[in-house]
Image: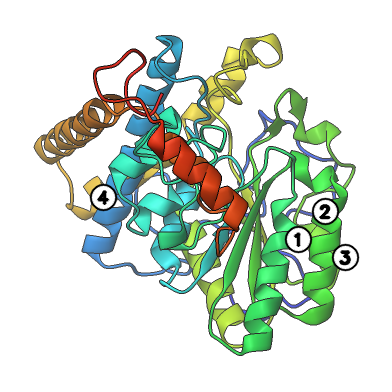
Amino acid sequence: MHDHDVEARGPVMEAPATPAPHAAEAPDLGLLRVFRDDGSADPATDPGLPPHVLLRAYREMKRVRLIDTRMMLLQRQGRIHFAGECRGQEATPIATGLVLEREDWVFPALRESAIMLVRGFPLKSYIAQYFGNAGDVLKGRQMPSHMSGRAVNQVAWSSCMATQLPHAVGAAWAAKMRKDRSVVLGFVGDGGTSEPDFHNALNFAGVFKVPCVLVCQNNHWAISVPAGKQTASPTFAVKGRAYGVPSVRVDGNDVLAVYRVVSDAVARARSGGGPTFIESVTYRMGAHSSSDDPTRYRSQEEVDTWAQRDPIVRLRRHLVHRGLLDEAEEAALEDGLMAEISAAIQEVEALGPPARETLFDDVYAELPWHLAEQRAEVLANRPHPGSQGGAGH
């Protein structure tokens, strides 16, 4: 991606104006992409990542796929209450996590939680959020699959669509006012582009040239509403240009293409060049969440078509082509990840609920006297271990 590709009034990297595509249509027309069908990389667009970064990207993508699979199974077994997987969409969060620096901030939607793991958030704490127990840094107060962590500058999001985008733009405005070098990433799905907050955020970002990157993961389905019924615009990327925000469209199942686009956009924001809007064209291979049955509104043929463009398979093919991965290494990697995830689940699931007194935490910078008295009373009357109900119940 070069400067002329994202000029606000220049060409948007997208297909010519046509009706919004249906989910099963070929996703790569007019998209920036790197991978070729044979596993090689197009030298014109390849970001040139070193082998250790490519292998790291693959490990992170495999890990989140395996975590999602396990969490859906745990939900079906009644061991957790809710799970939302990002199967098929791993390229965007993993590439983003590899690009960001420590001081940058992330305002995610449902399928970007794994950015936290790439940035160093502990796996046990991440899994504890599904359980909402004593190991959860959110103290069981948030809905499962709504992860956040101050340690990695990832902000909690709401199930109300697109509300995180004005927050992201506001945080970027604050960074600009303070003259620090932080860049803020805000995410939304294709369905969220129909919400007023999406348009408010893009307008503010364009007018005030804040250091943010707004990413729409167009996975073609807003629960059961297809992208073709979400907008009459030829693409979602064109919406950014309407607000004077440089915009780009990328193959969201190509981790190297996403890395290049996000890296360029972050560098542009950090240097004072203002915001970028990215449409990452991908596909939600699984259900919207553990509460959804996608067979009621889409065909298996459609899913199978997109499965051929699985982002993990495409990166694996590239690694094999480069001689960086073989079958034995692949098997060892998967065995190691499964052992890591299983050990974390076993340890986390054994924890009890958050202690009662945590009700008073994180509400005030300084606890008022009346709440301090109530907290002391709770502590004084806390059940002893071994008594009926157990400690903290």
Name the residue at 38% across, 29% down.
Answer: 392
Classify residue 365 as left or right of residue 344: right
Count all numbered tags in the image, as a single digit.
4
261 in relation to 72, above or below:
below
Closer mark to the observer between disc 2 and disc 3: 2
The secondary structure type at the circle numbered 3 is: helix
Measuring 28% from the left and 62% from the top, which residue is drawn there?
Answer: 53
Q: Tell which of 342 and 35 is nearer to you.
A: 342
- What secondary structure is found at the residue carrying circle 1? helix
Distance between the Cα atoms at labels 3 and 4?
A: 39 Å
Which residue lies at the image location 63% right of the left edge and 59% below the top edge? 186
Residue 300 in the image, given as x and y percentages of width and height: 58, 14
Which quadrant would the N terminus be assigned to in this image? bottom right
Q: Residues within 10 Å of mark 4 (few under 14, many from 20)?
A: some
The answer for how far apart the CA atoms under marks 1 and 3 are is 17 Å
Which-is-in-front pick, marks 3 and 4? 3
* Amino acid residing under circle 2: Asp
Q: Reading the chain from its start, which is encountered first: label 4 or label 2?
A: 2
Residue at 59% across, 80% down: 268
Q: Amino acid at mark 4?
A: Leu
Residue type of the residue flagged with mark 3:
Ala
Q: Quadrant of residue 354?
A: top left
Mark closest to the chain's N terminus, 1 or 3: 1
Q: Measure the alpha-carbon separation of dots 4 and 2.
A: 40 Å
Q: Which residue is mark 4?
A: 319
Q: CA distance from mark 2 to mark 3?
A: 15 Å
Decide which of 348, 309 is in the foreground and name it: 348
Pair 4/2: label in front: 2
Res. 313 visible in picture: no
| Residue at the disc numbered 3 | 242
